Image (cartoon, rainbow, N blue to C red):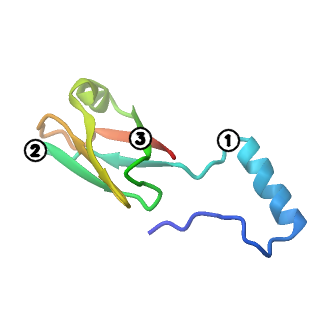
Amino acid sequence: MTTFRVATPIASQRELAQFINELRDGKLNSTGSFTLTPSATSTVVTNQRVSVETVILMMPLTANAAAALPTTWVSAQANGQFTVSHASAASTDRVFRFLTIG
């Protein structure tokens, strides 16, 4: 499991300034990636930042992922994971990056 950087109550001013500057620069610790499961119609993605109210945006990183995009959607989500439904294909390179908000 990935550990994400967080500001602690005992952080120094320098640590807080660095944390704020990273946020300003877009370093939100809110991205990840996954590959669609070959020859299946769903893929479960585990991520500790996901809740039932999280917005999940996906971006294809390969040509096969881009071709799969019209039939790919988030079909379920719970605390710590979401399920992506998709058309079945034997391709092993349908790779997506995702952004979580909320």
Residue picked out by circle 3: 56
Where in the figure is residue 59, as x and y percent of width and height?
A: 41, 33
Q: Residue at x 76, y 72 (%)?
A: 9
Residue 13 left/right relative to 34:
right
In this rendering, the answer to whether 67 lies above or below 9 is: above
- Tag 3: amino acid: Ile
Q: Reading the chain from its start, which is encountered first: label 3 or label 1? A: 1
Distance between the alpha carbons at the discs numbered 3 and 1: 17 Å
Distance between the alpha carbons at the discs numbered 2 and 3: 23 Å
Q: Residue furthest bottom?
A: 10
Residue picked out by circle 2: 39
Q: Residue furthest right?
A: 13
Q: Nearer the viewer, mark 1 or mark 2?
A: 1
The image quarter in which residue 64 lies: top left
Report the disc number at residue 26.
1
Residue 60 left/right relative to 2:
left
- How crowded pointer 3 is (Cα within 10 Å; few <14, some 14-19, many 20+) is rated as some
- Tag 1: amino acid: Gly
- Tag 2: amino acid: Ser
The image quarter in which residue 85 lies: top left
**Disc 3, SS:** strand
- Front-most of 61 and 23? 23
Q: Residue at x 85, y 56 (%)?
A: 17
**Disc 1, SS:** loop
Report the disc number at residue 58.
none
Residue 45 left/right relative to 20:
left
Where in the figure is residue 93, as x and y percent of width and height?
A: 27, 41
In this rendering, the answer to whether 78 lies above or below 76 is: below
